[in-house]
Image: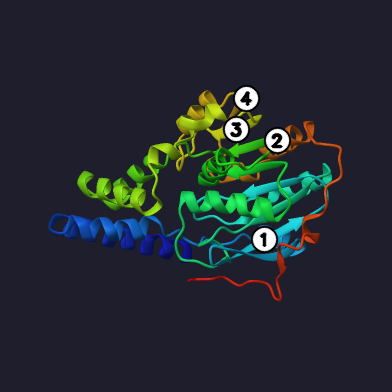
C-alpha cells in the first residue's frame, strides 16, 4: 500500500511539473529555461539500503571540505586504493558490494557521497562539479590505483581522468556517454519544448564555461590509455546499452561485457559483475606498499556520523 501511494504521489508530481513546463514555457521561455536548469541540477536523495548502511557503518568515516561543501567519505582496508564513484541521485553505499571482495584482494577502498547527494551537504550538483570531486577525493586519500564508477559517475570519473587524475585501471558500470542525451531525456520527461531545453543547455554551458560536447566520453576517450572493463545490461532502462557500446568503441583499451536481467541498479551488486571486476583490478595490482587512507591527515575525522542533509 505504501509503495502504491508513493507511485501515485510521484505521478502526480510529474504531472504538475509537466503542466508547469507547458504553460510557463509558452509565455516565458527564458524563465522556464532557468527553472528547468535548477530542476535538472538538483539530484534526488533515494531511499538508502540497510545492507549498504551496514557496510558503511564498518568503514572509517571522514569529512572532506570541497568547494564549501561537507563531503562524507568512508574507507576500508589497506593497500592500493580503489575509489568507488556513484551516479546521479545515488550515494556511496550503492557500490558497497565491491568493498569486501576488493579488501580481500589486498586493496583499500574509498567511497563517498557527492555534493548534493546522500549525507553530504549541498542542494545541486553537475557533471563538472562531480568530476572535480572525484579528483579531490582521490588526492585527499593519496591517489587512487583504480576507480569503479556507475552511470553518471563513470562520466565524472572519465572527465577527471582527462583533466589529470592518474589511475592504472578502471571499471565502468552502465556508463553515461554524453550529457546531451541526459538533457534530452530530461526534457522529454518534463515536457520541455525544443526551444526551452536548448536555452537550458546554453545556460548550463555558460554557468560552467564549457561546451557540453566536450564532456561527451567518445570525444575524448581515445586520449585515455587506461585498461577499462565496462559492464552494461542489455535491458538498462536508465542508460541504454548504446551508451556503453559508444564508450567501448572510443576507449582504446576497453572491453565491454553485456549482461541480461540486471537493469541499471542490480548490476551494482550482481556476483557475475562484482567478481570479474575485482579480478580485473587485482590482475594489475602493484606490489609496493600504500598507506591506509584513514591515516592521511588531509581528511578530518567526523566528530559524529553525518545525518541526511536536505539542504546546503
User: Mark number for residue 73?
Assistant: 1
User: Mark number for residue 168?
Assistant: 2
**Helix, strand, or loop for circle 2?**
loop
- 249 with respect to 106 (left or right): left
Query: Decide: marks 2, 1 in contact (CB < 8 A)?
Result: no
**Helix, strand, or loop for circle 1?**
strand
C-alpha distance separating marks 1 and 3: 25 Å
Dot 4 alpha-carbon crowd within 10 angstroms: few under 14, some 14 to 19, many 20 or more: some
User: Mark number for residue 230?
Assistant: 3
Query: Decide: marks 4, 3 in contact (CB < 8 A)?
Result: no
Taking 215 as reference, is 53 above or below it? below
Residue placed furthest toward the bottom: 303
C-alpha distance separating marks 1 and 4: 30 Å
Q: Residue at x 73, y 41 (%)?
A: 145
Residue beneath label 4, please? 253
User: Which is more N-terminal, label 4 or label 1?
Assistant: 1
Question: 264 or 24, which lies in front?
Answer: 24
Quarter-wise, where is residue 15 in the image? bottom left
**Helix, strand, or loop for circle 3?**
strand
User: Which is more N-terminal, label 3 or label 4?
Assistant: 3
Which of discs 1 and 3 lies nearer the camera? The answer is 1
User: Which is more N-terminal, label 2 or label 4?
Assistant: 2
Total marks drawn? Answer: 4
User: Which is more N-terminal, label 3 or label 2?
Assistant: 2
Colour approach in the figure: rainbow
C-alpha distance separating marks 2 and 3: 15 Å
Amino acid at each position: 500500500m505504501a509503495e502504491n501511494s508513493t507511485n501515485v504521489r510521484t505521478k502526480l508530481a510529474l504531472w504538475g511539473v509537466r503542466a508547469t513546463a507547458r504553460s510557463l514555457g509558452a509565455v516565458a521561455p527564458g524563465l522556464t529555461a532557468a527553472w528547468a536548469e535548477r530542476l535538472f541540477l538538483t539530484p534526488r536523495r533515494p531511499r538508502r539500503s540497510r545492507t549498504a548502511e551496514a557496510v558503511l557503518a564498518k568503514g572509517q568515516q571522514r569529512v572532506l571540505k570541497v568547494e564549501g561543501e561537507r563531503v562524507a567519505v568512508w574507507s576500508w582496508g589497506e593497500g592500493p586504493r580503489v575509489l568507488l564513484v556513484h551516479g546521479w541521485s545515488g550515494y556511496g553505499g550503492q557500490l558497497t558490494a565491491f568493498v569486501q571482495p576488493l579488501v580481500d584482494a589486498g586493496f583499500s577502498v574509498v567511497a563517498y557521497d557527492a555534493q548534493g547527494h546522500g549525507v553530504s551537504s549541498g542542494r545541486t550538483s553537475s557533471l563538472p562539479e562531480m568530476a572535480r570531486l572525484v579528483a579531490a577525493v582521490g588526492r585527499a586519500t593519496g591517489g587512487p590505483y583504480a576507480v569503479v564508477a556507475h552511470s553518471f559517475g563513470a562520466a565524472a570519473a572519465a572527465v577527471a581522468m582527462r583533466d589529470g587524475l592518474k589511475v592504472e585501471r578502471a571499471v565502468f558500470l552502465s556508463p553515461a556517454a554524453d550529457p546531451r542525451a541526459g538533457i534530452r531525456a530530461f526534457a522529454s520527461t518534463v515536457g520541455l519544448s525544443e526551444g526551452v531545453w536548448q536555452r537550458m543547455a546554453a545556460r548550463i554551458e555558460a554557468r560552467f564555461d564549457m561546451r557540453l560536447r566536450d564532456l561527451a566520453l567518445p570525444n575524448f576517450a581515445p586520449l585515455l590509455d587506461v585498461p577499462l572493463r565496462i559492464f552494461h545490461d542489455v535491458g538498462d532502462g536508465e542508460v541504454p546499452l548504446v551508451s556503453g557500446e559508444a564508450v567501448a568503441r572510443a576507449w582504446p583499451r576497453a572491453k565491454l561485457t553485456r549482461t541480461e536481467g540486471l537493469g541499471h541498479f542490480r548490476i551494482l551488486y550482481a556476483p557475475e559483475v562484482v567478481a570479474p571486476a575485482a579480478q580485473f583490478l587485482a590482475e594489475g595490482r602493484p606490489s609496493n606498499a600504500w598507506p591506509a587512507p584513514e591515516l592521511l591527515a588531509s581528511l578530518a575525522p567526523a566528530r559524529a556520523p553525518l545525518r541526511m542533509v536536505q539542504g546546503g
